[in-house]
Image (cartoon, helix red, strand yellow):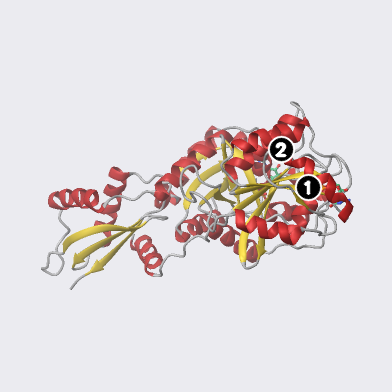
Amino acid sequence: DESEWAEFDEAAAEGDEAPPKPQPVLAVVGRPNVGKSTLVNRLLGRREAVVQDTPGVTRDRVAYDALWNGRRFTVVDTGGWEPDAKGLQSSVAAQAEMAMHTADAIVLVVDAKVGATATEEAVARVLRRSKRPVIVVANKVDEERGVADVHSLWSLGLGEPMPVSGLHGRGSGDLLDKVLEALPETPREVFGASGGPRRVALVGKPNVGKSSLLNKLTGEDRSVVHDVAGTTVDPVDSLVELDGQVWRFVDTAGLRKRVKTASGTEYYASLRTKAAIEAAEVAIVLVDGSEPISEQDLRVITMVVESGRALVLAYNKWDKVDEDRRHQLEKEIDRELVRVRWAERVNVSALTGRSVAKLAPQLRTALDSWDTRISTGRLNGWLNELVAANPPPARGGRQPKIMFATQAQTRPPTIVLFTTGFLEAGYRRFLERKFRETFGFVGSPVRISVRVRE
Ligand code: GDP
Ligand code: GDP
């Protein structure tokens, strides 16, 4: 039908809204209780304390947006990475490894009153291998006379330690200046396969299992943790490690909040969903596989396509899907989801963990497509052959000619066809189908627009 095409063309004509520019990332690492979270609050310029004195309270790995001297960056607080079974030292070292993979600069926080322990020495060994700038912070230097303790931290081999009091703010301005110096203007290899964490929106109508899936992916009961911690500052996003790669799940605060304030209207929820999609590069649209697909599900999918983001469809609650339902579902997919038949489908269960491990590879596939550019030469070689064998139908006695095509953009891939005369919708659909047969683009919307040269 025509409407499908009209939509794609309009979206392309409006000019694409690029995803927000990625910000450089600062990771804060260190042993528990050295004052990482206190310091992060200080860096964020917030008075409210995220910190609390209850020992053993696990916090999430969370990312916050910070602004200093007009520059924006993201701070990752690793405060909640509790020691695992392998012990404190290896868990803090793992923190440092993670920081090296995700961050553009790293702050290692040491309690100046305690000095460098074996743990700090192990972490320093890891960080010295890193190509990222590292700043050693000697925290809890609340008074001038504490400064003497700081010199011993030179022994970590990571440069000059900076005396700071996260609690009172002493030295934090200097630290921020140093952080800005260390951070690149833009994150390294932003869009590269091995670059900073790619942004994922986990969206879907209420009760499809978004929070449950996020819990499964992070392996923590986050909503409960959030309540216990009673934090006043909303983490913006969560970093989640899947399949050896770190992903940035955007606006997960909303997912957890919803548990407490279930009052949000559908309108508000829809705005929030839209914002999350816009902030992301790829969206996982979660639908409830045990129920017929609804208008609301289709609206979310449409939002993703219209925003031009990559898409992975996940059918959740698969543990409740029986033979009958599976049959129905296939029919539903043929009927309702033709326009996104290029999207990969994963059948998961947040409850049992079924196939949850398949999500990361699908995210990668979708993003690869989203990033792909077909050279003009290759595109036209393909097009000439196709058009020679299947010329566009004549209209009003005139045969439209396709002069050439070029991929004007990636993210999402956007093809522009330069023609003389109008191409019928049916023919354009034919071209898209053939285009996908040859070039794939699994998981990514593709926009094809036509520029008519009279
Ligand atoms: P984290 O586990 O590394 O995130 O540490 P927290 O930020 O939760 O802080 C642990 C404890 O150290 C809390 O009781 C803080 O109040 C305290 N603390 C943090 N920074 C300072 C500081 O600069 N001076 C003093 N005296 N105490 C601090
Ligand atoms: P959200 O509103 O999308 O965040 O959905 P929730 O994560 O709060 O889940 C809604 C309800 O569905 C809860 O009662 C969950 O326990 C349940 N649920 C979530 N995932 C699954 C699943 O894979 N299988 C089953 N049987 N129930 C699930």
Q: Nearer the viewer, residue 172 or 215?
A: 172
How far across and down, in percent of the image, does residue 177 sit?
Answer: 67, 60
Quadrant for the C terminus in the image: bottom left
Q: Are marks 1 and 2 in contact (CB under 8 Å)?
A: no
User: Is 357 positioned to the left or the right of 66 in the image?
Assistant: left
Residue located at (22% from left, 64% from top): 418
Q: CA distance from mark 1 to mark 2?
A: 12 Å
In percent of the image, x 86 and y 43: which residue is there? 113
Q: 383 above or below 58?
A: below
Give percent across and percent down for residue 361.
Answer: 49, 37
Say whether residue 231 is left or right of residue 267. Answer: right
Q: How many marks?
A: 2
- Residue of label 2: 156
Q: Amino acid at mark 2?
A: Leu
In percent of the image, x 73 and y 62: which residue is there?
A: 173
Residue 175 visible, this orientation: yes
Q: Amino acid at mark 1?
A: Ala
User: Quadrant of the rendered structure where residue 30 is?
Assistant: top right
Tell me the element at label 1.
strand
Q: Secondary structure at mark 2?
A: helix
Furthest toward the bottom, the residue is 454
Q: Nearer the viewer, residue 261 or 59?
A: 59
Q: Residue furthest left?
A: 397
Q: Provide residue 258's location: percent of width, then percent of height.
A: 72, 55
On screen, residue 392 above or below 311: below
Mark 1, residues whose alpha carbon is within 10 Å: few (<14), some, or many (≥20)? many
Q: Which mark is residue 138?
A: 1
